[in-house]
Image: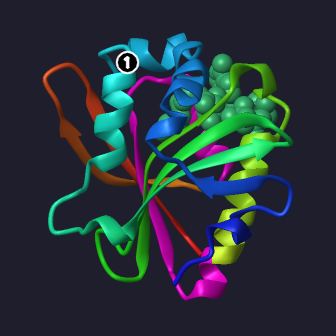
Amino acid sequence: MMDVSLFSNRYFVRPMAADDIGEIYQLCRNNVLYYQYCPPFVTEQSIADDMKALPPKKEAFDKYYLGYYDGEKLIAVMDFILGYPDPKTAFIGFFMTDVSVQRMGGGSNMIRDMCFYLKAYGLTGIRLGWVKGNPQAEHFWHKNGFTETGVTYNTDTYTVIVAQRAL
Ligand SMILES: CC(C)(COP(=O)(O)OP(=O)(O)OC[C@H]1O[C@@H](n2cnc3c(N)ncnc32)[C@H](O)[C@@H]1OP(=O)(O)O)[C@@H](O)C(=O)NCCC(=O)NCCS
């Protein structure tokens, strides 16, 4: 069983629940750039839906919708799937930090600590996707050691670049 409190040495990490949606919404709604590339704009309902969403053939016990706290303040959310697309790989479906803490190294710190824990847990890689052309996401994931797999897929409104990092 994974212990998500070990995802970070610096921040308090816990699974989010329906009660937390209002707080998550406040964090998300200020990330205007992200929703320009990845519409539609966030709503409390879209967060509730994301909290339940699963990739094909995955079960709810493999899904972790996490909040990162600095003291009392929610500073990041992550949607994490264990064992997707294969048993030794984790998938980050969504990762977002509060605009008030961005560009101060917090996001990279969270990814670094998480990779350290997941490697010790026995995983060999992490996979994720970003919307083609979103400079914030592309630069961030490159900086954190993710590289394009060459796989892309299209939605009605944007193209997703699939990237991976070995642990
Ligand atoms: C991407 C994101 C998680 C980074 O969080 P953060 O707390 O700023 O993380 P860090 O301070 O560790 O990393 C900053 C790095 O992100 C990238 N970055 C952040 N903002 C950027 C911007 N406006 N333009 C280009 N690159 C940017 C850069 O690589 C930057 O490194 P630098 O400061 O050395 O140039 C945050 O900007 C965010 O939540 N964005 C909206 C959601 C999103 O795009 N999530 C990723 C796709 S799922």
Residue matched to label 1: 43
Q: Is residue 151 left or right of residue 72?
A: left
Who is closer to the viewer here, 138 or 87? 87
Residue at 70% over, 20% down: 99
Question: Which quarter of the rendered image does ligand 1 occupy?
Answer: top right
The percent position of residue 156, horizontal first and vertical second, equals 13, 23
As displayed, is residue 160 above or below residue 118?
above
Who is closer to the viewer here, 101 or 61? 61
Residue 119, magenta (yes or no):
yes
The percent position of residue 45, horizontal first and vertical second, equals 31, 25
Instruction: Residue at the far front: name it.
Output: 19
Residue 152, by quadrant, is top left
Residue at 70% over, 67% down: 5
Residue at 30% over, 77% down: 86
Residue 54, by quadrant, is bottom left
Determine the secondary structure under disc 1.
Answer: loop
As displayed, is residue 29 above or below residue 113?
above
> How many numbered tags mark residues here?
1
Label 1: few (<14), some (14–19) or many (≥20) C-alpha neighbours in 10 Å: some
Q: Mark 1 belongs to which amino acid?
A: Thr
Magenta stretch bounds:
118-144
Residue 117, by quadrant, is bottom right
The percent position of residue 93, horizontal first and vertical second, equals 40, 48
